[in-house]
């Protein structure tokens, strides 16, 4: 029996239509209407509020593989940004009612208030298996009167929507104005963080390490980065996670190449990892169905330690897995050489590159989310590594 039937709710009909013509029929969940986007699935069993508000999900319809969603409600403390970013939401069995002392409203009320169209009561296991076999694809959710329209016309609407390949989306989710997250306690370092779709927990965790974080728009130039921290510039530069195809981010890659040339310590995550790969001369490519969720196994190749990590990416860096590292291809227009680089982390499910480490420059990155909001904390040490990188660079500068 569906949740709607158990609560005697009069829900509108809804239909989910994939671009290959596969159809799933269910009930409206959240706002009623229509939406299109890229269909992706998330394997996390908790942390749905952080998922919904992660800007990296912009223009994506998220399918939750966990069958029961919404039991802890939503609150004003856990959002990772100013709004819900997902284009649509797909669940099997919504909670009958929220049951958590921190809950301030139901998940469905929040979705409806923010105009997020969703669908419930469908076989999300079958949908996930379909996406694993066929790959991520465009999808539409249509509810209310639109659910009764001919499937052929709905498929045509889905197929006419934009692809994720070639999508430049960072400028659509970034902050409009710079802002500062002050260090907690004694200030030790100043970091310029380029917001490509940053989650609020990231600068918050940096601040807990004594870092004053200057969050800058995605359109920031290198000259603006250099002005952070005053005359001597920032102690480090950070590139955040974000949505879209890294192949479109030429301007951001150009800024990063100037950061590398200036030997400013650099740390990037997710989209920032892909941009470091591009800056070093490697290519990027779209994964069949991506990695999304808070239970992805990754191995640190230097320690052989396996970490359970939080992911949200549909693109990856195409770099060789040589354990000794390789010379960076360096296709920069000015011929700048960046020395050796090695793949520092790999996904144990499919050997996808999950981290890069420059061996001759103070720069590294990971493909996953060390702030893990929500998720495991196995990768929290990466913020300590950034501290060590900046401290070593500062001491070397003083000695020089």
Image (spheres, rainbow, N blue to C red):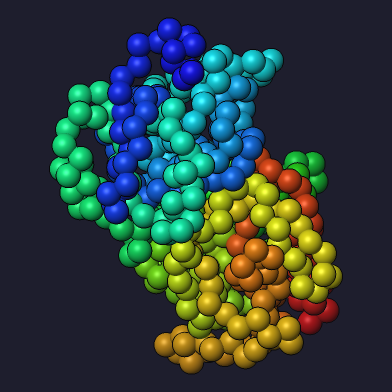
Nearest the viewer among 365 and 195 is 365
Total number of numbered labels?
Answer: 0
Residue 70, given in percent of the width and then of the height, sits at: 56, 25
Residue 130, given in percent of the width and then of the height, sits at: 44, 51
Question: 230 above or below 140?
Answer: below
The reply to whether residue 229 is in sight is: no
- In the figure, is residue 64 to the left or right of 268? left
Q: For the point 73% across and 46% down, which residue is it?
A: 376
Nearest the viewer among 245 and 70 is 70
Nearest the viewer among 203 and 14 is 14
- In the figure, is residue 11 to the left or right of 393? left
- In the figure, is residue 322 to the left or right of 115? right
Identify the residue at the far front of this view.
1
Identify the residue at the far top of this view.
8
Residue 199, given in percent of the width and then of the height, sits at: 57, 45
Q: For the point 44% across and 13% down, which residue is it?
A: 5
């Amino acid at each position: 029996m569906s949740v709607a039937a158990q609560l005697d709710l009069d829900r509108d009909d809804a239909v989910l239509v994939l671009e290959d013509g596969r159809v799933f029929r269910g009930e409206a969940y959240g706002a009623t209407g229509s939406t299109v986007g890229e269909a992706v699935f998330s394997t996390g069993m908790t942390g749905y509020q952080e998922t919904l508000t992660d800007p990296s999900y912009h223009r994506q319809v998220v399918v939750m593989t966990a069958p029961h969603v919404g039991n802890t409600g939503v609150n004003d403390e856990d959002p990772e940004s100013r709004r819900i970013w997902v284009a649509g939401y797909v669940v099997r069995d919504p909670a009958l009612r929220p049951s958590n002392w921190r809950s301030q409203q139901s998940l469905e009320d929040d979705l409806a208030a923010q105009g997020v169209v969703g669908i419930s009561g469908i076989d999300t296991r079958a949908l996930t298996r379909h996406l694993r076999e066929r790959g991520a694809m465009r999808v539409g959710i249509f509810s209310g009167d639109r659910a009764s329209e001919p499937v052929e016309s709905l498929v045509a609407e889905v197929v006419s929507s934009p692809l994720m390949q070639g999508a430049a989306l960072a400028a659509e989710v970034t902050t409009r104005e710079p802002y500062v997250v002050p260090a907690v306690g004694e200030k030790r370092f100043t970091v310029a963080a380029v917001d490509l779709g940053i989650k609020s927990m990231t600068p918050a965790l940096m601040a807990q390490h004594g870092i004053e974080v200057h969050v800058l728009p995605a359109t920031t130039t290198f000259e603006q980065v250099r002005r952070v921290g005053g005359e001597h510039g920032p102690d480090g530069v950070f590139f955040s996670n974000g949505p879209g195809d890294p192949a479109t981010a030429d301007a951001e890659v150009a800024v990063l190449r100037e950061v590398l040339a200036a030997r400013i310590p650099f740390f990037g995550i997710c989209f920032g990892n892909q941009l470091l790969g591009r800056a070093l001369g490697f290519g990027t490519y779209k994964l069949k169905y991506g990695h999304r969720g808070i239970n992805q196994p990754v191995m640190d190749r230097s320690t052989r330690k396996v970490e359970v990590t939080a992911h949200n990416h549909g693109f990856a860096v195409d770099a060789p897995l040589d354990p000794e590292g390789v010379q960076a291809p360096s296709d920069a227009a000015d011929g700048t050489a960046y020395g050796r680089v090695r793949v520092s982390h790999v996904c144990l499910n499919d050997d996808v590159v999950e981290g890069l480490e420059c061996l001759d420059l103070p720069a590294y990155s990971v493909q996953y989310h060390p702030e893990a909001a929500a998720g495991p904390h196995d990768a929290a040490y990466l913020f300590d590594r950034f501290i060590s990188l900046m401290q070593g660079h500062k001491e070397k500068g003083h000695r020089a």
